[in-house]
Amino acid sequence: MNTLLVTGGAGFIGSNFIVHFLEKYTSYRIVNLDALTYAGDLSNLKEVEGHSRYIFEKGDICDRSFVENLFSKYQFSGVVHFAAESHVDNSIEGPEAFIRTNVFGTFTLLDVARKAWMDAPFQFKAGVEKNRFLHVSTDEVYGSLGPEGLFSETTAYAPNSPYSASKASSDFMVRSYFHTYGLNVVTTNCSNNYGPKQHKEKLIPTIIRKALAEQPIPIYGDGKNVRDWLYVLDHCKGIALAFEKGRPGETYNIGGRNERNNNQIVDRICSLLDKTKPRKNGSSYKELITFVKDRAGHDKRYAIDATKIETELRWNAEEVFDTGIEKTVDWYLLHRLI
């Protein structure tokens, strides 16, 4: 039985990944390492409570001795690293936590894995030659696009927020451990995720939550900032494929090919809520939309070219935005917001 360390597995994407991976990859057990800060919630993993191949360990990825003890105890054959501070607004208010977790935490995991799995640069210990470290990152490291063009794996990095700068730094650290030590690493950079279990402060849950509470729905600036929206289960399937079949040292961009601006997002969600849970006064939730002061350094547009993972690993997003957002709204109505 192989043992996979998943960091940040109680968060939005990590919890969806764990459920998917346990179901599809029956030769693995998973150890979920999570500090259970504001974004981590064990209720996200109710589906696997008591699962024979699932173990939870509470701890901090920056605590080197704790991480070393986990590697010694479980003899991990792989790492999928989700754990990160990830909310841009929070990084503007308090960037230090982002540097600590995203940069130093990633370094700690990489270095512990290197020493556990390798005797010397490019020399793996016997029996662990296929051990792999997959690092989950973001398209925000590439900066902002104009009206045309897409981010590819060769796009120059140009992070514009403390969050994206910390993720760019962690990406470079992962790259360095491949080129300097020969550690078997793969990096994935994703577009904006949405779907079940997302933290309430993110855009789509905020729209749903505020609408149902009959409160103003805040939209930054003019609402014309564009993102490529990726349904979380599609992302998890891409990560699993990259872990299983990706080439060592490579980066794979994972995107949904579903560009929408924030005005289109809020309009679609309000229309769905108008049908599924109409307001008592009979008016549309769209009347609650309120434009607020724009975020500092707000990138105008992100969009990913997913050709590499589509052609090399035969991955394709199964959900288009209209189907994914219907599933997402239905999930929040059922589980969180009524």
Image (cartoon, rainbow, N blue to C red):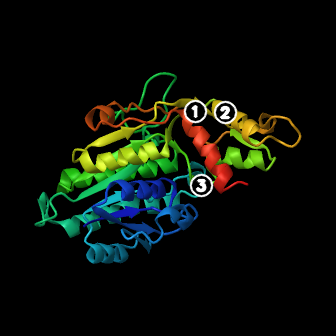
Q: Secondary structure under badge 3?
A: loop
Judging by the rendered image, the residue that carries numbered circle 2 is 268
> Between tags 1 and 2, which lies in front?
1
State the image coordinates of residue 262 (x, y, percent, origin top left): 63, 34
- Sort mark 1 into few (<14), some (14-19) or many (20+) by Cα contacts within 10 Å: few
State the image coordinates of residue 192 (x, y, percent, origin top left): 51, 41
Indicate the amino acid at tag 2: Arg
Indicate the amino acid at tag 3: His
> Does residue 89 appear anywhere in the picture?
yes
Residue 199: which disc? Answer: 3
Judging by the rendered image, the residue that carries numbered circle 1 is 322
Indicate the amino acid at tag 1: Asp
C-alpha distance separating marks 3 and 2: 20 Å
**Residue at left offset 64%, top offset 44%:** 329
Does 218 appear above or below 90?
Answer: above
C-alpha distance separating marks 1 and 3: 21 Å
- Sort mark 3 into few (<14), some (14-19) or many (20+) by Cα contacts within 10 Å: some
Dot placed on the residue nearer the N-terminal end, 1 or 3: 3
Dot placed on the residue nearer the N-terminal end, 1 or 2: 2
